[in-house]
Image: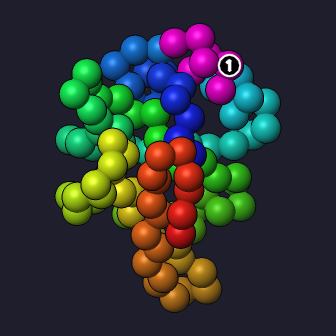
Amino acid sequence: MDSNARSKTWLDAKTNARGRKLKEYIVSRHLHIINEEFYRATFFNCRGRSNTDLTITNYNLLAKVSEWEISNEDSLSEQNYIQYTIREGGAKNKILSIETRGQHLQ
């Protein structure tokens, strides 16, 4: 999700009003943020960087998602590619999740 919400909860440098509201929503719906601490930010431009792009799941999928990372591949956008693995029934399926200009593509 391209949330445009900043929160220290998801490893951003600061928390804004939108971040507080989104955190309340995530908690109220029993959702989980998969983002992990990483040396790159999910969003960057000439004014700075932030972690406003989030990977969110429910409890049922949480244990199946692993290897979350921000790709080094150039996205030609202000958002970096986010990659993660979803395991289903012992099989390993690599999913490339792309965040570009507010649209989520898979």
Which residue sits at x=48%, y=82%?
93
**Position above or below: 29 against 9:** below
Give the camera-side residue of 47 and 39: 47
- Was residue 20 drawn as part of the magenta stretch in this picture? yes
- Was residue 15 drawn as part of the magenta stretch in this picture? no
Q: How many marks are shown on the rendered structure? A: 1
Expressed as whole percent of the image width and height from the top left, the position of residue 56 reads 60, 48
Find numbered disc 1 in the image and state the secondary structure of the residue it sits on.
helix
Expressed as whole percent of the image width and height from the top left, the position of residue 89 reads 61, 86
Q: Is residue 22 left or right of residue 99?
A: right
> Furthest residue to the top?
17
Which residue sits at x=79%, y=38%?
29
Sort mark 1 into few (<14), some (14-19) or many (20+) by Cα contacts within 10 Å. few
Dividing the picture into quadrants, the one containing residue 90 is bottom right
Specify how the rendered protein is coloured.
rainbow
**Position above or below: 37 against 27:** below
Asked whether the viewer can see residue 24, the reply is: yes
Dividing the picture into quadrants, the one containing residue 62 is bottom right
Q: Main secondary structure of the magenta part?
A: helix
Give the camera-side residue of 81 and 8: 81
**Position above or below: 61 against 54:** below
Amino acid on which disc 1 is placed = Lys
Expressed as whole percent of the image width and height from the top left, the position of residue 91 reads 51, 88
Which residue sits at x=22%, y=62%?
73
Residue underneath mark 1: 21
- The part of the chain drawn in magenta is 16-22
Q: Is residue 73 left or right of residue 35?
A: left
Expressed as whole percent of the image width and height from the top left, the position of residue 104 reads 56, 56
> Furthest residue to the right?
29
Which residue sits at x=69%, y=34%?
26
Give the camera-side residue of 74 and 29: 74
